[in-house]
Image (spheres, helix red, strand yellow):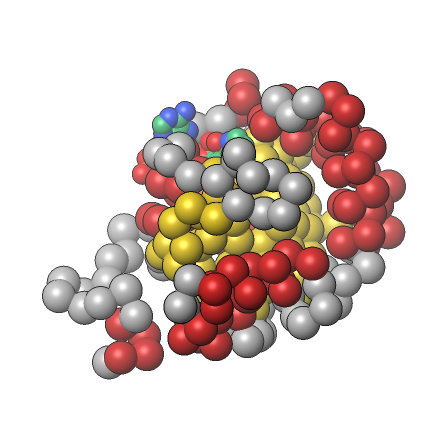
Amino acid sequence: MADRTELRALAPPAFTHAVPALLEIYEAAMRPPTEQLPGRAAVMVSHAGYPGFASVVAVEGERPLGFAYAFHGREGQWWHDVVTQGLRDHGRSRHARRYLADPLEIAEVHVLPEAQNRGLGRSLLHALCAGRPEPTAVLSTRTGPSPARHLYRSCGFVEVLESFSFPGSPDQPFSIMAARLPLLGPGTRRPRGRSPWWPWTG
Ligand SMILES: CC(C)(COP(=O)(O)OP(=O)(O)OC[C@H]1O[C@@H](n2cnc3c(N)ncnc32)[C@H](O)[C@@H]1OP(=O)(O)O)[C@@H](O)C(=O)NCCC(=O)NCCS
């Protein structure tokens, strides 16, 4: 990670206070349609009230360069229920039981474009997942090759659903990815010849 950059954990009130600044990072990293930003801000504020919420911000001086947050996923939450149903609809109920029974749900990981490829994303992800009580982590990311997918795969995430469309966004396919915690560290690899389900299948 860059020398003068530090990671700070934000408790829910501090995170809520920081949402406008974090939204600027989100906007620069994801380039969403501007009209979606107020809705995104509202979702982030509401996520701060979810059980097990945790967030990490990478700051250089007082300037935030990137952030990530997650919470405990459970029944009754929109993403959790939609993805669980999606896995069942695709005949992957086993994956739902393995990965979504008691998961850490990683909601956002973003780094300003000018600060990318310096190790911040990886540091944020590891900081977020370290010491969590959940046995698994789950997330969604846009389908297709991307730095995000490369990062997640290198930390042990596997695709449990390759091309999933969320309700209301039929033209934007996402990959649903899941990992067993703790994440694989830099340079750690699963033993050759094991299936992606190695932690369970021995
Ligand atoms: C995904 C993201 C958070 C990664 O953050 P980052 O700080 O750039 O990531 P890191 O520097 O820790 O690099 C992680 C890996 O991605 C690779 N990577 C990062 N940027 C890259 C780029 N532009 N092109 C190719 N590979 C890239 C790095 O090489 C590294 O892999 P390695 O360790 O095998 O070399 C960042 O690229 C980003 O904000 N992207 C846009 C928003 C986004 O897609 N968020 C995720 C939504 S699910």
Please provide percent x and percent y for residue 62: 74, 29
Q: Is residue 129 left or right of residue 94?
A: right
Is there any visible trace of residue 7 in the rendered image?
no
Q: In the image, ligand 1 is in what quadrant?
A: top left
Label tally: 0
Quadrant containing the C terminus is bottom left
Please provide percent x and percent y for residue 35: 77, 24
Is there any visible trace of residue 148 in the rendered image?
yes
Residue 42 location, quadrant: top right
In terms of depth relative to the viewer, which is nearer, 18 or 45? 45
At x 65% / y 25%, what residue is drawn?
32
Farthest residue to the top: give it: 114
At x 40% / y 68%, what residue is drawn?
91
Farthest residue to the left: give it: 193
Q: Is residue 123 left or right of residue 55?
A: left
At x 66% / y 70%, what residue is drawn?
74
In terms of depth relative to the viewer, which is nearer, 104 or 169? 169
- Residue 103, placed above or below residue 64: below
Residue 151 location, quadrant: top left
Residue 200 location, quadrant: bottom left
Please provide percent x and percent y for residue 156: 36, 57
At x 86% / y 51%, what residue is drawn?
13
Q: Is residue 15 left or right of residue 166?
A: right
Please provide percent x and percent y for residue 96: 48, 70
